[in-house]
Amino acid sequence: TSRFGSPDDFKFFVDTCHQNDIGVIIDWVPAHFPEDGHGLARFDGSHVYEYADPRRGWHPDWNSCIYDFGKDTVRQFLVANALYWLEHFHVDGLRVDAVASMLYLDYSREDGEWIPNVHGGNENLEAISLLKWMNEEVYRHFPHAMTIAEESTSFPKVSRPVFDGGLGFGFKWNMGWMHDSLHYISKDPAYRTYHHSEMTFSMVYAFDENFVLPISHDEVVHGKGSLIGKMPGDEWQQAANHRCYAAFMYGHPGKKLNFMGNEIGQSSEWNHDASVDWRLLDFDKHQGIQRLYRDLNHLYKALPALHQRDHEPAGFDWIDLHNHEQSVFSFVRHSLNGTQQVYVISNMTPTPRENFRIGVQQPGEYQLVLNTDDSVYWGSGAATAKQCVAEPVPWNHQPYSINLNLPPLATLFIVFNKE
């Protein structure tokens, strides 16, 4: 809408972001379009852009029109539009909305409400062809751009190159991780022992795609509540759960997506008619959460082990994924050259664990670089050693181990740098 400014104003915005080292990814929606009279629907009185048959051309969930992905003029229009944003506005990437609804002819439809493809299947072959072409053109003309699929099914090779049989996207949202981890963290800690696998199962398929871990607007709207509002317990425990979960997410393989407001622990769910509730930063709790996200972002950039091998199996090892009795998770991330390791340990209960032994892979000194229970984050500030030396005590199937105190509802980052 022009109420937010002109195209030139948006170009100025993107340029200003780039001057401040901020990339810009836009939401691009080729899946459907509104039926508003001033838009593309029945553009000249006939079905110019949409399928004529409502079994293909009408979306029952959103009451919107679906592009005719098999028509050459529509395909040219959509691919040209994707390139237009990159060429003329210099955006850095396209997050492609509702990809699942494009891939399947029976998406959100009952029997008799959809038409099979020429092979009798439910795949929309025309949409699949379009997405492949779009991604090929984007990466051919703009090799440093990124395309990100918001795709919620198990459709294979979404983020694999077209020449390898994939759709060609750079990344895919990991909806499975999001759903499982939010379900887990919303449980009372006393019951998390029965849901332990919800935090570990994502590693079974973590490297099948180039995943993004999405805590998006969809999770904090339509009665779902805010992120911190999903957390159980009193005010302190809710904040501690929030911080513990945020650091677990930053340690987990996959790129990170956080919706605005999460970074200050906004109490109310998203309201598209209002801004982020910045007044909350008058309170120590919310200042602490903001400080944590700032430090997490800094560490994610500064520690190669946390980002270099997000999509490689060799960049991750479980230390202990079976400790459901204590609801403690521990794993290690590896840098590309093997000179750095970051150990991530999460205690998902309010019970402190003193003299807790963790297996490590190398002898030497280990440095604590993050403790979400630190008092600067509005944590309890319970004493935890800043440094520890590995002992030749085999543990967790590792040749060495370190002994430390695990604070309540907290995640620790411990770094080992090989000399």
Image: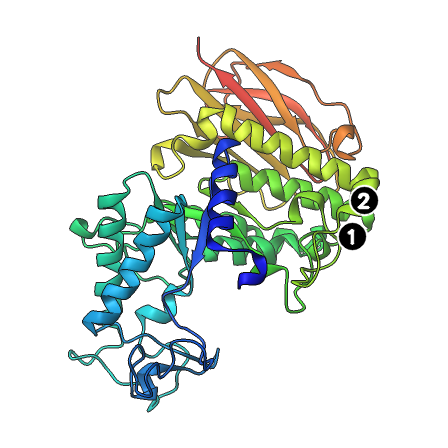
Q: What crowding class fits label 1: few (fewer than 14 Cα within 10 Å), some (14-19), or many (20 or more)?
A: some
Residue 109 in the figure: left or right of residue 5: left
Q: Amino acid at mark 2?
A: Trp
The answer to whether residue 371 is visible is yes
Identity of the residue drawn at 75% across and 51% down: 277
Label ID, residue 63: none
Mark 2 in CB contact with mark 1 (< 8 angstroms): yes
Q: Amino acid at mark 1?
A: Gly
How many marks the image carries: the answer is: 2
Residue annotated with mark 1? 233
The Cα atoms of the two marked residues, 2 and 1, are separated by 8 Å
Q: 232 and 398: which one is in front? A: 232
Residue annotated with mark 2? 236
Q: Quadrant of residue 368?
A: top right
Expressed as whole percent of the image width and height from the top left, the position of residue 68 reads 27, 76
Identity of the residue drawn at 60% across and 54% down: 184
Q: What crowding class fits label 2: few (fewer than 14 Cα within 10 Å), some (14-19), or many (20 or more)?
A: some
Q: Quadrant of the C terminus?
A: top left
Q: Which type of secondary structure does the marked residue at label 1 adopt? A: loop
Identity of the residue drawn at 43% across and 46% down: 203
The scheme the figure's colours follow is rainbow
